[in-house]
Amino acid sequence: MRTDRRTLLKLIGHSATTAGLLSLSGCSSAIRPTSDFDWDTNAAAIRSRIVPPTFPERSASITDFGAKPGKQNDCTQAIADAIAHIAQQGGGTVTVPEGAFYTGPVHLKSNINFHIAKGAVLHFIPEPERYKPYVFTRWEGTELYGYSPLIYAFEQTNIAVTGEGTLEGGASETIWWPWKGPWKEAKWGDDPEANQKNTRDPLRAMAEKGVPVEERVFEKNYLRPPFIQPYRCKNVLISGVTIRNSPFWLVNPVLCTNVTVKDIYCHSYGPNSDGCDPESCTDVLIENCTFDTGDDCIAVKSGRNADGRRVAQPCENILINNCQMKAGHGGVVIGSEISGGVRNLYAQNCEMSSPNLDRGIRIKTNSLRGGHLQNLNYRNLRIGQVKDAIVINFFYEEGDVGNFTPKLEGIRIENLYVQHAQRAFVLLGYDHTPITGVTFKSLTFEKVDSPSVIENVADITQQNIVINGKKAELPNV
């Protein structure tokens, strides 16, 4: 095992800490927002290809098939019947009307718009046995047969979840979340059996040995399902809804093409409550969304370790525009399950700020994950309060113990304004494979409390970096 050494470079002085949430009113002069992806012909071409699905005028309410509001009424079968009926007719909209309805998993079919009307709250009953039989799914980048996601579609075309209503996952300190095990200061997660590691660890061992996915089935399964997971689908739209209290990741399209996620509000403070995690997808737009989550707000992924390399599908052509990030481990994140690589990402016009926002822009991987990360572009971003503003870390979790060193190529961060950070940069490469291929241009950090952490960085292109009112230059070390 190679030693993970750290070197602190005192690039900047210390300044007083500011408490509380900071206003972004001072950012306007530093940022010149744009509403279009006019970066280059590649970004414009991606945007022109992403077209939300449309649906026939045909529609039905779940109440037409026996659904009734109230906690005492299980609407699972009524919702399934409504979806099947509209699908058999050639497609259309299935509506959850105003009121509180309760259900188990919802499985979408081709040409179905599942619409949650304004004033509707669809509660997903938090009883794990309801989310069986198991389905083909991915959990933290590894494929298996596991619990059905709360809303799931497999190999379907033209599907949507829309509306102004609320999707309530029902996860809490008593159901779903305790399977994480001990977490932060939670007073739960001490059950020696009902702990995700008891399923996760053998699953990962199976993946490393190349065990076929159909054999990755566990009688005792403690892997929490994601909320919305379209898998191998084409033409996907998730729009308008509020998503709350998810067992696991909130919006997780996997191996999908032509995906639009817009105008959604994600609010979930549980463990692994990532907001939107496109995995191994092609042509994805994430726009006008708000993330207030217990983990990464947006995390781009492409499979973990051997399983990610087996599937060998990068996440590519990702557009992120005009999103707001509040609490979370990271604002716009790459990784850590990134073994299939990622290319052609364009993130712009986003605002991030919270005393609980750990990192703004983050790339996390290691030599077990690897991954070729190329043409990742960030511009016109505003950060009010954050702990670490820009993080590139090759030592995430396991460190440097594998044979698949990450490769960065064409990483560009431009026109970034940060009002208050504990640290401006955390850049940690390997001594044998330093961080390269990075460009920083026009970055302003108004107030930074602590020195940056930089190790094993080479050939950084930099222009106009200002920290605590002074021009700064990052060393190549």
Image (cartoon, helix red, strand yellow):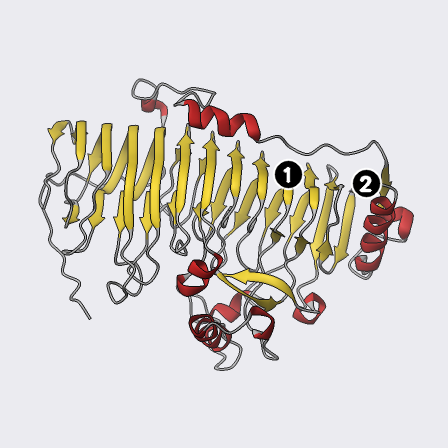
Q: Decide if residue 297 is in sight here.
A: no
Number of callouts in the render?
2
Q: Residue at x 63, y 58 (%)?
A: 149
Please identify, in this view, whether the residue under mark 1 or under mark 2 is nearer the observer.
2
Which residue is disc 1 drawn over? 237
Identify which amino acid the numbered label 2 is placed on.
Gly
- 33 or 186: nearer the viewer: 33
Task: Rate crowding at label 2 as few (under 14), some (14 to 19) or many (20 or more) other CA atoms within 10 Å.
Answer: many
Of the numbered discs 1 and 2, the one sitting upstream in the chain is 2
Residue 180 coordinates in the image, percent (x, y): 48, 68
**Residue visible at 29% across and 28% down in the picture:** 414
Name the disc covering residue 316, or none: none
Q: Is residue 437 left or right of residue 127?
A: left
Give SS at disc 2.
loop
Q: Quadrant of residue 239?
A: top right
Q: Residue 242: tell me if it is visible.
A: yes
Q: Is residue 169 above or below residue 332?
A: below
Q: Residue 60: where, in percent of width, then height?
A: 86, 41
Instruction: Inspect the image, locate mark 1, and give the three-letter code of the amino acid beneath it.
Output: Leu
What residue did someone put label 2 on? 91
Q: Taking 332 as reference, is 199 above or below it?
A: below
Point 41% across, 36% down: residue: 345
Query: Residue at horizontal 47%, vertical 37%?
Result: 318
Q: For this view, does 241 lie left or right of residue 85?
A: left
